[in-house]
Amino acid sequence: MKISEQWLREWVKLNADPQQISEQLTMAGLEVEGITPVKPKFSGVVTALVEKVEAHTDTEKLKICQISTGTGQQPIQVVCGADNVRTGLCVALAQVGAVLPGVEELKPVELHNVLSKGMLCSAAELGLSEKSIGIMELPADLPLGVQLADALALNDQIIELSLTPNRGDCLSVAGIARELSAINRQAFAAPVISRQTVKTNPVAKQHREIIIDDHAACPRYIGQIISGVDVSRISPLWLTERLRRCGLNSINAVVDVTNYVMLELGQPMHAYDNDKLNGTIRVRYAKLTEAFQPLDRSEDIKLSTDTLVIADDCEILAIAGIIGGRKSAVLAASKNIFLESAFFNPHVISGKARQNGLQTESSHRFERGVDFAIQQQAINRAAQLIIDICGGSFAPINEALANDALPMVQPIQLRYARIERLLGTTIPKAEVGNILTDLGMQISSNETGWMVSPPSFRFDIHIEADLIEEIVRIYGYNNIKTRLPKSNLRAYAEGKELHTQIKRMRTLLVARGFHEVISYSFVDEEIQQIFNPKITPIQLSNPIAPELSVMRSSLLPGLVKTMLYNQKRQQQKICLFEVGSIFMPDLKQYQGDMIAGIINKEIHKKQWDREYIFSDLFDLKGHVEALFELCNSSLDLSFGHCEHPALHPGKSAEIILNHQGIGFIGSVHPTVQRQLGLAGETFVFELSINNVYNENTVKYCEISKFPSLRRDISIVVAEDVPVATIIDIIEIAASPILYDLELFDLYQGEKLESGRKSLSFHLIFQRISSTLTDMDVDSVLTEVLNILKKETDGSLREE
Amino acid sequence: MDKELAKMIERAKAEIGAVCHINELEHLRINYLGKKGHLTERLKQLGKLPPAERPHLGKAVNHAKEIVQQAIQNRRQSLNEEHINAKLATEKLDVTLPGRGQDIGTLHLVTQTLERIESIFSRMGFEIAEGPEIEDDLHNFEALNIPAHHPARTMHDTFYIDEKMLLRTHTSSVQIRFMQEHSPPVRFIAPGKVYRCDSDTTHTPMFHQVEGLMIDEQVNFAQLKGLISEFLEYFFEKKLSIRFRPSYFPFTEPSAEVDIYNENNFLEVLGCGMVHPKVLENMNVDSEKYNGLAFGMGVERLAMLRHGIDDIRLFFENDLRFLDQFK
């Protein structure tokens, strides 16, 4: 919210300068975002009077004007092109030498052979508005020859506040002034608002009946008819200036007045063209099929049936507290108006503006709470201003009121001891009393502290803690001494091993050259479809962009996107992983952490002394196996057949732990690779992280004191026998004495029968209890070879 | 005889000196000192001499043996040295060639920052708690004193799944879940991803937060100030000018925004406050007996301040040229 410093000073006497005021407000919880001077950078501009206007002989567009800057002064000749220049108009004259926004020094010029010694300025040329039509028309009663900045009281600052939603009471000059009065302990001096002095005109037809259907929603509604107004009259400059400084445009005199009163007192008001109303004013809820056209729309909108509206006998006139309708809007031609000043319950208004996309100054205030005791004062103020500007006369006000539906002001017990307990500091009793009173609270002392009744404009004070917050806010957060929490040291109650384990897994991959990425949890549905065609993803009902519209059911769409992003930026080696949650359609079933990785074919660093090799699936598999080894679960790990729609059928595997599939690894299917635009062969893995982690505490195994024996054997088997089958057989058959096994060669080629391959292993044998003999090992090996022969038709390779 | 010995010594010395290879030296050793070596033979011949001459000559032969042995040993040492020196002279590497192996990767800066925050609070005795990212309205709003249509909801631009489920807008939702299973005293932080429909240089639709909660009998606002100051000074590794400014969160009261003074400006770094009595009640905590303090911070924001990053979107573009800077 923007507020004028000058206006504020009318309401509270302050010694502080704007900088200090802003500091005070910020430190009281009303954050000041900035202070901007009202006066744009101009000088040498004075008030002046157009004495004579003559047409230019050369061109119709220009007029030659004689401008007076006061009695006794020589008139100045200025050539002006504005349509609205006319004799008797009070204008802003930029004299020769003047500085304007974008003009360093104004010089005399000849326009079509006529000398112009100055310029008549528009508001836009002076930086006083974004755009303007014609030159500025100043009020006729301004003294002439005075600096414009003084004449318009531009020596003002705009204080811009960012208010928290609990402080609806501060959305007005009066509200901010109240706060400053409490902070500075200076009297809050509302300027005297003159009573309605014009005689009322008690004509029967000027009375409009008001009926409220739901008093809880609208406890008070005041209406007043003002007849015989001339809305075509222009709002006075002081009024439009104040509106402008607070960020509002001038619409017409009546609307300007209602806006002015809203800014001044915080009461949103609405004016209807009384001649467009039919019968009774009714505050009711919208009906199912009713149409309504808000004044800022060109089409009807539909309202939900819990939307409170103002209607007459025929139709909806306004959405209560939010916006008026187009049909009954006050226009320049309006002759009679019906003025509304009401209190709507915040609960009824809140959410409705957002729901209909109609957030207005009015809804902003009503949602947060408007002082429920101020409607009468506001309507008096507005009516008076309207008559002052537009003339006319008003009928008596008509108030519909349900007293018992007005918000209840409940006294709150404040315990003195509780203040210290919550804040950890002592604030003297007298000071507490002063702060509360200064904030407009009614207080009475009792045994433990005070009974406190908050004022009608505060909607955020219901309990003791609310009061303590008020006290400390004014007392000053900075005045509270800093202490450290007292400790009750406890070790962590629960195992956070998984957390530590994930940390180790990340570190391992980083040490192996992977970059961790974090991508959005919402992804492109199309890309996700490629990886998880069977899963209907969770849709966001309000995504920020179409390509971020579904929750990820795999980390791969994000990784692929990151791979593409970096490939487009000419990165060679790309080796990425991510740890994060995925989201399955049945949420109860799954919101779990996954770990996934992606590498391209160029992950090997070019070394100066060896030939370059492209990466393949086994590079990635090595990294994945390392994760299991790190978590002590590699013994139960195996890789099996995988059918993944996005992976190469011959170069992919399911990752199986303890007979349960927990993820997959593979080369991206060539079709998918092309479809996604990935450069070259790409390898991915993804697995459920919780499953990798082995909860069992490692138990020590005895180390043998006896020497080991080593044998190297080569087994020849058919090509399609998986290595894992051979290893399993050896491990089981040799288990009593086998200590370690390592595949060190794989050969397929001319030295072998076609369709066969040779696998060479180092086998290390050792016993815990005694030394092994060659005979022990030979007999085990014979057994191993027998089983291999039987189960795989494998045999020892002949040299 | 003595003369002969002296000659033999001379000859041996000359031959030893002339040897160029360690193998030849070994031959010489066998020639003179081996079982059938010249000097060994001499000793064997002692028995043929008259007993009176034996001691004298025995001594002389042994002396000669020692001299030859010593000469061989010296020569061996110098040959070894020559050999090593010759080897060293030929073996010279360009040590400026790069070492072999793979480059290391990087932990994402958010992970690094989270770990840093977690480590500071862990040392102060805070546990780490987690909760779901797709939340229900109850845990994200209602239980935190933000009923439907509360104007505070406009502070959170929420992503909705349906009428009930949403993407959590803060990790405060974890507070409620944690307290359903624990009772005071408690002290924990809840790190994690949060979501708001917003995107510009200072907002991304997803970011990370760390929320903290401490509930005990003697917890107060002065301690909250102390705890937060302690954290910030550890985090930024310097003395800071810290300002606690009154603010509003529906779930704390009093509430504060914390600003740090940096280059003539106050920068907002986190929000905190004393837990609202209604929220304590929603956690089944007796608000007469216990007080709570709570705080919440944006992880990216803290990382941006610490590392001088000016655009939050960099965190989620995952450009390797960005990631690689933070080893």
Image (cartoon, helix red, strand yellow):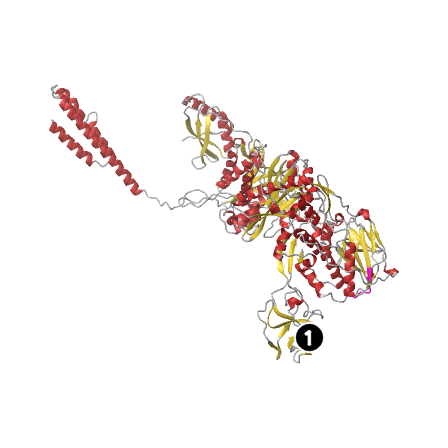
* Residue found at the very far front of the displayed protein: A430
Instruction: Determine if the magenta segment contains residue A22.
Output: no
Name which residue lies at 14% across and 20% down. B47
Q: Position of residue B127 (x, y in %)?
A: 58, 36
Q: Quadrant of the N terminus of chain A?
A: bottom right
Chain designation of label 1: A
Residue type (three-letter) at the residue carrying disc 1: Val
Taking the magenta stretch, the answer to whether it contains residue A226 is yes
Residue A649, visible in the rendered structure: no
Location of mark 1 (residue): A50
Q: Nearer the viewer, residue B44 or A714?
A: B44
Q: Is B276 left or right of B77, judged from the image as shown?
A: right
The magenta segment: A225-230
Determine whether A248 is above or below A620 in the image: below
Residue B147 in the figure: left or right of residue A554:
right
Please name the residue shown 49% across and 29% down the image.
Answer: A793
Please give the name of the residue rendered at 14% of the width and 21% of the height, measured from the top-left corner: B55
| Image spot of residue A195 (x, y percent) | 79, 60
Residue that lies at the very extreme toward the top in this rendered image: B51
Label 1: few (<14), some or many (≥20) within 10 Å?
A: many
Residue B13's spot in the image, x, y percent?
18, 33
A75 vs A9, nearest the viewer: A9
Say above or below: A5 vs A78.
above
Report if residue B190 is visible in the image.
yes
The residue nearer to you, when weighing A155 against A99, is A155
> x and y percent of residue A339 in the render?
79, 58
